[in-house]
Image (cartoon, rainbow, N blue to C red):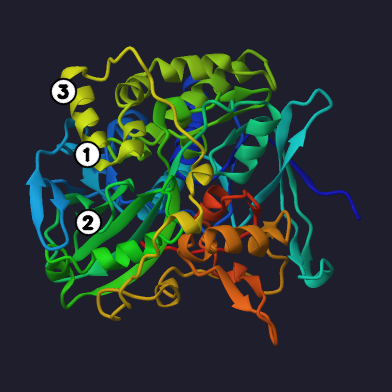
Amino acid sequence: MSEREIMEYDVVIVGCGPAGLAAAIRLRQTAAESGQEISVCLLEKGAEPGAHSLAGAVLEPRALDELLPQWREDETCPIKTAVTTDRFCFLTEKKSYRLPTPPSMHNEGNYIVSLGRTVRWLAEQAEGIGVDIFPGFAAAEVLYNEQGAVVGVATGDMGIAKDGTQTGNYQQGVELRAKYTIFSEGCRGSLSAEVMKKFNLRTDDAPQTYGIGIKELWETEHANPGEVLHTIGWPLRNDTYGGSFLYHLEAGKIALGFVVGLDYKNPYLSPYMEFQRFKHHPAIAPLLAGGRRICYGARALNEGGWQGIPQLAFPGGVLTGCAAGFLNVAKIKGVHTAMKSGMSAAEHIAAALKAGNEAATLNDYEKDLRTSWVGDELRKVRNIRPMFRHGLWAGLSHAAIDTYLLRGKAPWTFGHHNDHSQLKKASECQAIEYPKPDGELSFSRLENLAYSGVNHEANQPAHLKLRDNSVAVNVNLQDYAGPEARYCPAGVYEFVKEENSDQHALVINAQNCVHCKTCDIKDPTQNIHWTTPEGGGGPNYDSM
């Protein structure tokens, strides 16, 4: 095999989300301010910037105000819908009860946005000041020097057939070498996980905890631009953390979704079907009546907050954004904190380059970020999410005490647990019977999947791999009733009976994958390994 082509940059950024783009823009801004020349490359595995971007999303503009102060005067900026109304409700099966909106969820001065459109606009700003953005190229390998420091990444080969041979479209990956590499892959990034393990950035007693967010975008005549609604309660049981969001956008659109904490215990629970059932609630169904859903998607999200953040710096690189876990789960926002982490990383890297340092460990980046408003914001709410492991009412009661009485200054910090270890055996749980989707408000997973734009090159090796092929049936199906067939929101995993046999086999429909990473997180045996598929594959979200 021939040697790979090498491209050299001062900084390579993996991931074209808010953190990566903020880092790229701030690097070029700092270079201009200080008279430096800093070359910046940004890799995006999606077909275009924003193709894989999915969030609620309500944007707190604090970081954007720091990065691009004139954004409000830019007519091309898609951030237009200011929040006008906040509601927070508890649902029973038939009723809705309005609760006081927690201070962390107040949205005065915030905007309802499409994250995908916002990312595309930020990408235009980055390219306008000299950032090279390469969409459709997935970073598949971390490069190290002889001393073990990170010196860049390599993109995956393209045009590899399922049997491992090269097709007529074969294209060898490229090495992008850099003095510093920023990992901004988003939640549960595969290369970020590699460097965390290599440099021991996350200790066993400080695990991350996650949720899965499932979202639909609807066109409906009942939209009220600027209105925000969050709900807790039904259809989830009190022992399961989660809730819904409904954000009213302009042009008759409502973004609605459902989040379920991935520390749930019942293997029969299906986050997707809980969402479909939720839409039939008497307080929700009228908002969608006569409308149509126009887009669908799902994504895992970090819920660990302050105590779930690993060490951020290592020789030759840093972690930023949701790759590290900067989501403020109490606020249900993470774009502003992700952007600020990217900006801080950029400033420290620019200073190191100016001083002639290469591949150093930027410990001051982590120190400064933890003592910035990001650290202050996350530290204050650090104990809210962990208490929900004891149930909804215990969580709400503690959240009230922590917020109003202790004001986030409790002298203790509760820890998290690994989500996959929380699943109980099927024999200990009751099966859940879900209503059949009606095709008007609720839909089957495969029917909804058509609205995600998902597409993968058919003739390529499956990017979802089993570490042990026997475990899926002998352990997961036998002991846990095959939970992967329920927690996946895209119908990737299904157990089928083998021909002329009572035995089952796990079929992996990798072409359905929307890159949510839930399987990599929730698999009770950690037998599923999510790897990077050929660049450009996956969902292609429109305005999500």
On screen, 461 above or below 143?
below
Apparent side of residue 82 relative to residue 38 in the rendered image (left or right): left
Q: Nearer the viewer, residue 242 or 103?
A: 242
Task: Kindly identify the residue that appears in the image at 51 percent across and 26 percent down.
Answer: 345
Position in image of residue 364 (x %, y %): 53, 14
Q: Are marks 2 and 1 in contact (CB under 8 Å)?
A: no
Circle 1 packing at 10 Å, graded few (<14), some (14-19), many (20+), is some
Q: Identify the element where label 2 is drawn.
A: loop
Say which mark, if any, is on residue 393: 1
Q: Which residue is mark 2?
A: 234
User: Which residue type carries mark 1?
Assistant: Trp
- Label 1: state its secondary structure: helix
Q: Which residue is mark 3?
A: 404
Residue positioned 62% across, 48% down in the render: 526
Displayed quadrant of residue 368: top left
Is the C-beta separation of discs 3 and 2 under 8 Å? no
Mark 2 surroundings within 10 Å by alpha-carbon count, few (fewer than 14), some (14 through 19), many (20 or more): many
Which badge, 1 or 3, comes first in the chain's sequence? 1
Q: Position of residue 490 (x, y in %)?
A: 48, 67
Counting residues from the N terminus, which is met first, the one under dot 3 or under dot 2?
2
- Of the pair 53 and 68, the residue shown nearer to us: 53
Label 3: which secondary element = helix
Q: Amino acid at mark 2?
A: Trp
Which residue shows up at 36% across the image and 51% down it? 260
Q: In the rendered image, which quarter contains the N terminus?
A: bottom right
